[in-house]
Image (spheres, rainbow, N blue to C red):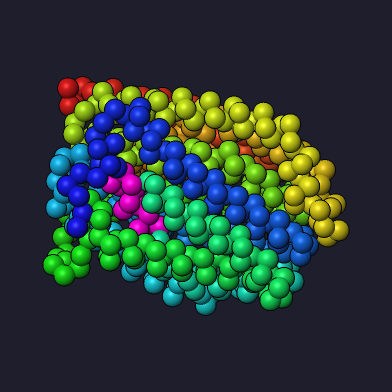
């Protein structure tokens, strides 16, 4: 049976600075290992040549849509659970968890059914060449077909995060990523499956993690929230509470996928498919910098949700600003690391004869793109603050401002309109992110002041 107050719940209701740090730490480790897997995955695929790298790069926006659906509903459930815990309503926290799982499974099944028949048409429409299209379709069929499993694992992780249990969420991420790293070379090279083997390695790892989540939530049952379907009863208010944050969060992450889709088109126009290979590889390194922020954002959302549920705006503001200061400090360190080790990072993706020719362009991309990272905490953690207080539509607006409006606009302006080519695209991504972050932070601070006046 679940304890009355787990360690995670006690953390949520305690000092906001310590809570952000304690909840963020495990998620940063988990996300870092997951990103390490993404890099290792890219390294193994790089051995197959630049076409294989381009294939997984062009699939990335579709994969982001799957992740958006999964993570969005997970964030919606996590935020709602944290607010119920802050209000000390354990029964409703458990019911919210059950509703989140049901919603996620339905969405996962619908997505796979709708996307699977049209994969070839989608990839052909963005201008992928014949060989790359063949690789793309084979790779995509595996992961799109298993979307419901990916959605479930993300939602289960969101439930754990919502009650402050980020340690087990971390264990699942580390275990899944570690297994994926082991399976990649076996599936890709040992079993001679090529790029499709990378997809099967990913899906296999996700399946194993889903079994682990089922054990924790439904068999061991030692979570604070009580999850059981025996007395499940549909509640439209709970669904609305989840979706009010979950749908905008999904759309926010889909806007990232859409932005990546549009950026891919701009990059193809400015630098061809080699440009895509460069961007895909560089972006994997940029994720090393974004990873700590994702972990901090998860902690900030939970802490702010609990503070808002308890109507404690002082703790809310403290958690929000502490998260931003912590994130900014980390990003400055990442900038220094990438600038110093750009050559070494580039070699990870250009060691094969088929990819060696993009080495110089990749080094240049790394040294330009890294400068957008210090601005990210101001926008990302403002978005998390909005999610924590249940204002999903504002979180969505912040993300759209950064991804679709500013990032795409400046990339097209510098890369195509002003004819600076592929380097201009890197400039545009940086300028767009910095501009959007400044606007978002001002909006976030005004919102906190408004909450203080409203709730006293």
Instruction: Report the magenta residues as a range.
Output: 154-165
| Residue 100 inside the magenta-drawn segment | no
Is 370 located above or below residue 75 in the figure?
A: above
User: Is 57 left or right of 234, judged from the image as shown?
Assistant: right
Name the side, left or right, on which 239 lies relative to 44. Answer: left
Secondary structure mostly taken by the magenta-highlighted segment of the chain: helix
Residue drawn at the location 39% of the way across and 47% of the way down? 167
Depth order, front residue of 251/44: 44
Image location (x, y in percent) of residue 247: 35, 53
- Above or below residue 46? Residue 380 is above
Q: Work out which quarter of the rendered image holds the C terminus and state it.
A: top left
Q: Is residue 126 visible?
A: no
Quadrant into which the N terminus falls:
bottom left
What residue is rendered at 34% in x and 65% in y? 214
Residue 230 position in % (x across, y down): 16, 70
Quadrant of residue 368 within the rendered picture: top right
Front residue (pair 346, 37):
37
> Residue 366 at what x, y percent from top left?
71, 39
């Amino acid at each position: 049976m679940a304890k009355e107050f787990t360690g995670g719940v006690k953390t949520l209701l305690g000092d906001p600075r310590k809570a952000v740090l304690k909840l963020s730490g495990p998620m940063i480790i988990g996300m870092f290992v997951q990103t390490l897997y993404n890099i290792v995955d890219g390294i193994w695929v790089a051995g197959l040549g630049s076409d294989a790298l381009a294939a997984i790069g062009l699939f990335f926006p579709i994969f982001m849509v799957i992740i958006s659906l999964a993570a969005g509903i997970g964030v919606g459930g996590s935020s709602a659970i944290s607010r119920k815990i802050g209000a000390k309503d354990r029964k409703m926290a458990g019911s919210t968890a059950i509703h989140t799982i049901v919603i996620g499974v339905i969405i996962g099944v619908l997505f796979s059914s709708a996307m699977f028949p049209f994969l070839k048409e989608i990839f052909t429409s963005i201008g992928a060449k014949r060989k790359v299209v063949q690789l793309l379709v084979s790779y995509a069929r595996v992961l799109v077909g298993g979307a419901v499993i990916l959605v479930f694992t993300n939602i289960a992780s969101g439930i754990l995060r919502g009650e402050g249990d980020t340690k087990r969420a971390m264990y699942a991420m580390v275990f899944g990523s570690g297994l994926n790293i082991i399976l990649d070379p076996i599936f890709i090279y040992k079993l001679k499956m090529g790029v499709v083997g990378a997809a099967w390695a990913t899906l296999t790892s996700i399946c194993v993690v889903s079994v682990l989540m089922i054990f924790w939530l439904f068999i061991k049952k030692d979570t604070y929230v009580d999850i059981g379907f025996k007395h499940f009863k549909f509640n439209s208010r709970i669904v609305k509470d989840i979706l009010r944050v979950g749908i905008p969060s999904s759309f926010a992450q889909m806007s990232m996928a859409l932005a990546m889709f549009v950026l891919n088109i701009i990059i193809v126009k400015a630098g061809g498919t080699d440009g895509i290979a460069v961007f895909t590889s560089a972006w994997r390194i940029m994720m090393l910098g974004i990873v700590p922020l994702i972990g901090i954002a998860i902690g900030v959302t939970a802490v702010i949700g609990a503070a808002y549920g308890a109507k404690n705006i002082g703790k809310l503001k403290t958690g929000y600003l502490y998260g931003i200061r912590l994130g900014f400090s980390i990003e400055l360190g990442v900038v220094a690391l990438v600038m110093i080790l750009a050559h070494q990072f580039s070699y990870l993706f250009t060691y094969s004869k088929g990819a060696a020719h993009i080495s110089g362009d990749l080094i240049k991309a790394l040294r330009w793109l890294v400068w957008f990272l210090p601005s990210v905490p101001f926008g990302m953690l403002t978005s998390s603050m909005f999610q924590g207080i249940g204002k999903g539509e504002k979180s969505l607006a912040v993300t759209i401002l950064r991804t679709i409006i500013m990032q795409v606009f400046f990339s097209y302006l510098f890369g195509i309109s002003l004819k600076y080519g592929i380097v201009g695209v890197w400039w545009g991504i940086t300028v767009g992110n910095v501009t959007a972050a400044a606007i978002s932070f001002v909006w976030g601070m005004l919102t906190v002041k408004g909450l203080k006046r409203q709730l006293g």
